[in-house]
Every structure is written in C-alpha cells, then in structure tokens.
Image: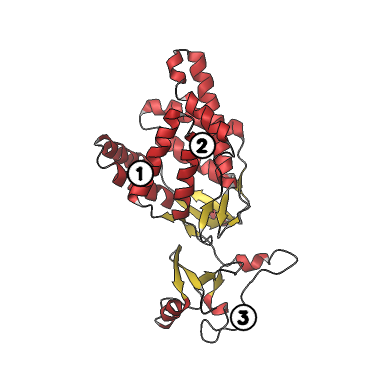
Amino acid sequence: MSNRNWFYASEGQQKGPLPEAQLRDLITRGMVGADTLVWTEGMAFWQKAGEIPGLVPSAGAPPAFPQAGGPPPVAASASYSGGALSADFPIWGLFGRSLLMFIGQIFVIPAPWTATGLYRFAIPYIRVPGRPHLGFTGQPLDIWYVFIVLGLLTYAGAANSNIVTLLSLLLQGFLSWMIVRWIFSRLSSSGQELPISFNGSPAVYVGWYVLMVIAAVTIIGWAWVMTAWLRWICRNVEGTRREVTFNASGLEVLWRTIVFTIGCGFLIPIPWVLRWYANWFISQFALTERGALAAA
C-alpha cells in the first residue's frame, strides 16, 4: 500500500488525501493514533488505523476489503459515528456557476445544462464524514423537462391572474420535489453511486413550499419555516445507516441571510458573501448514528 493516498478523520472532518509516508509521519508524531479512522482506495469502509496491518506498530487485524459474493459485514462500516459536513467552495467558481444557472433560468432552454453544471461543480467540494470523493452523476437530460417548465413558470406572474399564480406555485413546489429526489439519487462516493434516496411525500413537500411563500410575508417567519422544512427533508433521506440532521436555528438562518442579502445589494461583495453563506449552510448538516438523537 506504500504508493496509496490516504484519508483520515479528525474532529468530525475528512482530511487528505496524503501519501502513506506523510500519514506514517503523522502517526509517529502522535497526530494520528491507532483509533483514528482512515481510508484508502480499495477499502470497503473506514477503519481504525490500528486495524491496518503494518500501518501502526503492533497492528495485526486485516483491513475490510470487499468480499466476493456479497456485501461486506455491516459491523465493518459501523465504526464511524458521523460528524458535521463541511465545504470550501472556490469564490469565483461558485459565483460563476451560480450566475450561469440564473441566466439559464431566464433564457429557459439552457436551464438543464446550467443547473446540472452547478451541481456537478459544487457537490465535490462538500466533505462528508465517511464518504470520500463525493460526486454528482446527474446528466442535463435526466429531467430536462423539469428545468424547462420551471424556467417558463418564472414568467407566470405576467398573467395577472390569481388562479394562474396559485397553480404556478403548486407546480413549482412539485417540480422542486422532483429535483430534490433526482439530486439525492445521483450522489456518488469515489466514483460509485450511493444507494441514497429522498422518499418524502410530494404532497407534504408542496405544503412546505407553499408555507414558505406565505411565511415570507411576515419578513422573518420564513427562517423558522425553512429550518423545520429542512429537518423534515433530512428525516426522509433513506439508504444510509446514519441519520442526516440540520442543526441551525431559525435565528441563525435569519441573520446570516440578512447579511447575505445586504452584501448582494452592494453587488461587489456578492462572490464573497455567496461563498461565506454556502460554506456555513453546508456546515449545519451532520450525520449521526440512527437512534442517537432519541437516546440523548
């Protein structure tokens, strides 16, 4: 394994990749211990460094490589309890892709390509504990019609009809639900698609969407609706042994959104406040062992 690159977990975050020689140096200096979780290409799961033969002195247990004929034991992947997600988006890359997505929405036809381009660019910058090399495998033509219709609905307000506005709102909520399902179903780790899905009811999702629009009238109430909505979405993510949680409060969402909006109002700070806001928002999601919150 001397030529492999390694990742290790520290304070709930994924570190690496780094050459094995550098990892061994960290072990020698005590920065990586026998109980530190590590991963390299070819391993089925994250394992304690002390369980990797030859990596840490006195280690002797074999690593959990995939076995032919069936999935690896569940216990082998249960050693990592989870932690907070994090992100470090490049300023101009995030701004440029976001701007292209906005332009694509206005011109409608490019919308599937600009939206998919943003997801494929941004998701690899999100670090998920126990899921190295997160990626997005969605293609622009997967649900192209959803983005086209959403783009057209941005002009529905010109109809000056309450009925058209209401129907447009309901349809936007449903199409948003389709996009969320699509995104979760196209997540990958180290090039392998993850068996993750979003199974929230479309009717309930549309209800949350409408409630968000109504809460916007209160100026501040939408922030608490958003946090509750995101927690509901997290509870309906399936296919992972760990629970996804959203930990920010409504007040935290509110004041940061106000700062973000003010920064955008001055135009020049937009790339910087966009990165600041996006990095913070991702950091409010976390993975926990199922049942851990109930036990607490």
Residue under label 3: 61
Outermost residue on the front side: it is 109
Label 2 amino acid? Pro
Badge 3: how crowded within 10 Å, few (<14), some, or many (20+)? Answer: few
Report whether 237 appears left or right of 125. right
Residue under label 1: 95
- Callout 1: SS: helix
Q: On the rendered image, what quadrant is the N terminus found in? A: bottom right
Q: Which mark is residue 136?
A: none
Outermost residue on the right side: it is 69
**Dot 1 or dot 2, earlier in sequence:** 1
Percent position (x, y) of residue 126? 45, 54
Q: CA distance from mark 3 to mark 1?
A: 47 Å
Outermost residue on the top side: it is 161
Give the label, 3 or 1, closer to the camera.
1
The image quadrant of residue 138 is top right
Label 1 amino acid? Phe
Residue displayed at 54% across by 46% down: 234
Q: CA distance from mark 1 to mark 2?
A: 18 Å
Residue under label 2: 112
